[in-house]
Every structure is written in C-alpha cells, then in structure tokens.
Image (cartoon, helix red, strand yellow):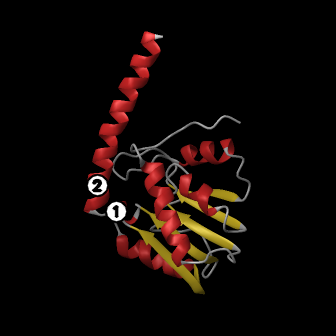
Amino acid sequence: GKVKAYEPVPGDFLIKKTGMEIISRSIDLSGAEIGLEIGSGSGYNAALLSCSVKRLVATDLPDFNVDSHSLGISVAKDLLSGLDVKNVYLASCSGEKLPFADESFDFVFSSSVLEHIPDKEAALKEMMRVVKPSGVVIFVIPTAVQSVCAFFHLYLYIIKRIMDVVAVKTF
C-alpha cells in the first residue's frame, strides 16, 4: 500500500530514528513478548519498535488535538497499514487512564509525550501499574538542544521545498 508521509515537524523521523538507535544500544528489548507505547503520534516509533517485540500496543488519543499535540490514532493507523506492520495493535486512550490489566507489559515506551500530559503523576502511576515487575519504562523527553535542532531542520525543509517547486517549474 501507499504510505502517507507525515512528519509533524521537519526532521522528526530522523530524530526518532536516532533516539531509537541510542535506546537499542542501551536496552535490549528483543526478548519482549509484548510492549506498550504511550502516545504513538505518527506511528513511526511503533513501526521501529515492532521489529523488536512479538506484539506492541500503541496508544494515542482518538482525534487530533492542538492542546495535547495529539495527531489522532488514525495517523498511526495509516502509517502502520501502509508499511504492512502486522504486530502492532492500536488503542485510543489517555496515558492517565490506561485500560490494561496490572503487570501486562514487558516494557512501556513514551517519546515526546509526557510533557503534554496534564496529570503527569497519574500517567506515571499508570505506566508503573501496567509494566511487569521485571519490565522497564522508557521515556524520551525533548530538551532545549532538540528544539534548536528542530528549528534548524525547519529551515532546511523550507529550502528543500522551494528547490522542489523551482525544479518542477523550470523543467
């Protein structure tokens, strides 16, 4: 199928890929039966995680929401379907109230999400509740350095788009 390219911020996929490479060098998730991703966004991290785990549940809010920065679960659904990823199951829910049994997951993963959740304490308690005692909870939280890099990527993206338009119009 056709994959709809969707990066909420220019350079987002590159940043996520690099982050996942760093995580995979530090934490071995290859033996995990089932993992949970909180806030799947575009679905890109879910696609990467799906290669390391037997089953992954990826969550996000049901609809686009400016305040929470949620893209809506359909964006992840489109990307994962386009990539023909079969071992990721999507669930619409908030990180503050997870609809899963205690100690259900080998790991819980969250990237650039915690800072957007209003009740961080409730979300952290929920993540700790659903992870197995031998499991791990992984958070990726953006820093000021990442924001500066994202700003630089925006200029590169704009220049690339201008060049694409110029190239099309001149040929």
Q: Is residue 104 visible?
A: yes
Q: Which mark is residue 147?
A: 2
Residue 164 falls in which quadrant of the image?
Answer: top left
Q: How far apart are marks 1 and 2 (CA)?
A: 7 Å
Query: Which label is found at residue 142?
Result: 1
Q: Where is residue 109 in the image (x, y as percent from the top left)?
A: 52, 69
As drawn, 130 above or below 61:
below
What amino acid is at disc 2?
Ser
Image coordinates for residue 72, horizontal then vertical, percent: 50, 47
Q: In this view, does 54 lie to the left or right of 23?
A: right
Looking at the image, which residue is at 67% across and 58% down? 89
- Determine the secondary structure under disc 2: helix
Question: Dot 1: within a 10 Å radius of its alpha carbon, few (fewer than 14), some, or many (20 or more) residues?
Answer: few
The quadrant in which residue 78 appears is top right
Is 98 in front, or is 55? 55
Q: Label 1 amino acid?
A: Pro
Numbered marks: total:
2
Instruction: Indicate the secondary structure of the residue bearing disc 1.
Output: loop
Looking at the image, which residue is at 58% across and 76% down? Answer: 107
Looking at the image, which is closer to me, 159 or 37?
A: 159
Report the disc number at residue 7.
none
For marks 1 and 2, the one nearer the N-term is 1
Q: Looking at the image, which residue is at 67% across and 41% down?
A: 82
The quarter of the picture where the N terminus appears is: top right
Q: Label 2 near label 1: C-beta < 8 Å?
A: yes
Q: Which of 141 and 10 is in front in this view?
A: 10
x, y (%) of residue 74?
A: 57, 44
- Residue 92 visible to the viewer: no
- 81 or 166: nearer the eye? 166
Crowding at mark 2 (Cα within 10 Å: few <14, some 14-19, many 20+):
few
